[in-house]
Image (spheres, rainbow, N blue to C red):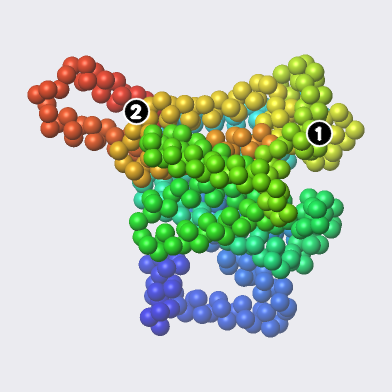
């Protein structure tokens, strides 16, 4: 009885934590059992789904932190149900859930009469510009299909809302470390799934999906099956593994508990194996790029020496002949100019340049690739395979769209680079966190030039989530530096120079204008 009451309290609150509440719960369970016996198992499944889905759905409206954790989890694992034939519109349901959460948060802002902390901080204006520009693409005169716009605009109009919600919710370093650790957990599960695929083969529904979608040429190369984990393809899986390996390999010292460190080391091994067994060359390129960025920004001679040793080891691996397929795959990553697929991409990009010069706002969202073949077959762009996130943005939204898109990264990274001066930060945790994000964005921008990943899950959610966390970290790091600076100068007020006072006041004003939304 006591345990049952605790369960009720946890599920529906103090109001129903009574004997009557327990009676209602037991009565409902018995009713469900009778219905199952009188009808069939489909009724039980439907009722179970309603009992679980409805509380989760309404929690998205009132529990912002839960909603963000939910969206992160779904972004990693949504590839699994998408491979199972079903009539449920999974993609639209996911988008609707994001909108539902956003409206719930707006309602809270209305109740508190506080919109500034959510909607008025510097980088978010560039997010608004990107969302608005993609929304206006519905009127693109060169677009061949409005239906293609509806199906492809959602990652660019709805998913950026996660940036706004995440920035509002995660306000302390402790919260940030917790959610980043959670993301490592779900990424490790995805990596372990990919390792299982390599060692034991695909599950039945995965193989049926490969055959039904004629995807064998993507997952079977040179007599070997590639792992794709819970994502949509080996390429996306490999890029995810590469990004997360870099990201969390640097963050191990930030987590203080021994159990966390042990888990992170085990997780990194699994993620690295997932990267290798994906056979994704872009994923292999991410690792050295990320580490080079971190070493370059560290500002320490010893780190530069370690970096030089690692570069020497990497160079040895690249130039040394080997019969191992996986090593050969890694070596081919750094010899892309000799690769036929790379040459074909360059030829495609050269062919499209004259057309781009005459279409400054592009050919419309969904005009290229799979969506182009589905909604506007026979057009010039429907046969164009961008094979690059930047090229796709440029073709579908024009040079104007590419400028709007890249301006967000500029607004995010340039102030952080010039104002934070990460190489001189006193707090080692903030230094490691921010260095990791610089490496993440540097590697992401490079790999997006070679792979079309921005509008595809989990990257279309993860990008906005990590961007919001980065913005919050910048604010926290600046605030911590100001606090240290004030404490230091409080101890020597007598020798405090007027020039330093003006400098401090100027930096305080900058912080308030750029990052302080409260």
Circle 2 or circle 1, nearest the eye: 1
Kindly tell me whether residue 501 is visible in this rendering. yes
The crowding category of the residue bearing disc 2, from other C-alpha atoms within 10 Å (few below 14, some 14 to 19, many at least 20), is: some
Image coordinates of residue 183 in percent, x first then y, are 51, 53
Which numbered marker is on residue 509? Answer: none
Quarter in which the C terminus is drawn: top left
Q: Is residue 375 visible?
A: no
Question: Residue 511 shows which numbered tag?
Answer: 2
Residue 145 horizontal side relative to residue 499, left or right: right
- Asked whether, in this view, residue 111 is left or right of residue 286, the answer is left
Measured as percent of width and height from the top left, residue 256 is found at 35, 56
Disc 2 versus disc 1: distance between alpha carbons? 47 Å
Residue sitting at 36 percent across and 45 percent down?
A: 429
Residue at 67%, 71% in the rendered image:
45
Q: Residue at x 64, y 70 (%)?
A: 47
Q: Which mark is residue 344?
A: 1
Secondary element under disc 1, as helix, strand or loop, is helix
Query: Percent position (x, y) of residue 97?
Result: 59, 50
What residue is at 75 percent from the left and 62 percent from the top? 206
Frontmost residue, 436 versus 276? 276
Q: Quadrant of residue 315?
A: top right
x and y percentages locating residue 224 in the rendered image? 77, 57
Q: Nearer the viewer, residue 130 or 12?
A: 130
Look at the numbered discs 2 and 1 and tell me whether their residues touch, using CB distance below 8 Å: no
């Amino acid at each position: 009885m006591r345990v049952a009451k605790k369960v009720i309290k946890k599920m529906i609150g103090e109001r129903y934590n009574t004997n009557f509440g327990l009676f209602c719960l037991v009565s409902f369970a018995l009713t469900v059992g009778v219905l199952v016996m009188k009808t069939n198992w489909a009724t039980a499944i439907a009722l179970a789904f309603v009992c679980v889905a409805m509380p989760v759905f309404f929690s998205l409206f009132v529990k912002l932190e839960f909603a963000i954790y939910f969206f992160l989890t779904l972004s990693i694992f949504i590839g699994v149900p998408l491979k199972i034939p079903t009539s449920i519109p999974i993609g639209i349901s996911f988008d609707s859930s994001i909108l539902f959460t956003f409206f719930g948060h707006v309602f809270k802002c209305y109740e508190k009469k506080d919109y500034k902390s959510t909607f008025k901080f510097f980088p978010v204006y560039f997010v608004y510009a990107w969302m608005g520009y993609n929304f206006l693409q519905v009127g693109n005169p060169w677009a061949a299909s409005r239906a293609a716009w509806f199906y492809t605009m959602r990652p660019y109009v709805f998913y950026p809302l996660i940036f706004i919600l995440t920035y509002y919710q995660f306000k302390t370093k402790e919260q940030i470390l917790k959610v980043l650790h959670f993301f490592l957990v779900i990424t490790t599960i995805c990596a372990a799934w990919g390792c299982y695929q390599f060692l034991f083969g695909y599950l039945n529904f995965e193989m049926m999906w490969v055959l039904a979608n004629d995807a064998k040429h993507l997952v079977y190369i040179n007599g070997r099956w590639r792992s794709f984990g819970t994502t949509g393809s080996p390429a996306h899986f490999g890029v995810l593994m590469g990004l997360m390996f870099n990201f969390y390999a640097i963050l191990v010292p930030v987590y203080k508990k021994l159990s966390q460190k042990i888990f992170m080391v085990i997780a990194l091994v699994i993620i690295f194996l997932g990267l290798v067994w994906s056979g994704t060359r872009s994923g292999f390129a991410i690792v050295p790029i990320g580490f080079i960025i971190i070493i370059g920004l560290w500002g320490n001679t010893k780190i530069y020496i370690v970096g030089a040793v690692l570069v020497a080891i990497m160079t040895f691996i690249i130039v040394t002949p080997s019969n191992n397929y996986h090593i050969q795959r890694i070596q081919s990553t750094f010899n892309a100019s000799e690769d036929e697929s790379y040459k074909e991409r360059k030829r495609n990009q050269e062919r499209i340049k004259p057309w781009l010069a005459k279409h400054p706002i592009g050919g419309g969202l969904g005009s290229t690739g799979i969506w182009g073949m589905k909604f506007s077959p026979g057009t010039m762009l429907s046969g164009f395979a961008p094979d690059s996130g930047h090229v796709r943005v440029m073709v579908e939204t024009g040079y104007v769209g590419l400028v709007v898109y890249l301006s967000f990264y500029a607004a995010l990274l340039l102030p952080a680079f010039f104002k934070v001066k990460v190489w001189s930060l006193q707090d080692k945790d903030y230094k490691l966190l921010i260095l990791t994000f610089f490496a993440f964005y540097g590697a992401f921008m490079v790999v997006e030039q070679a792979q079309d990943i921005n509008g595809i899950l989990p990257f279309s959610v993860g990008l906005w989530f990590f961007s919001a966390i980065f913005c919050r970290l910048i604010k926290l790091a600046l605030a911590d530096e100001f606090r240290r600076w004030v404490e230091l100068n409080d101890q020597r007020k007598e020798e405090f120079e007027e020039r330093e006072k003006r400098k401090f006041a100027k930096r305080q004003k900058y912080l308030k204008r750029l990052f302080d939304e409260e």
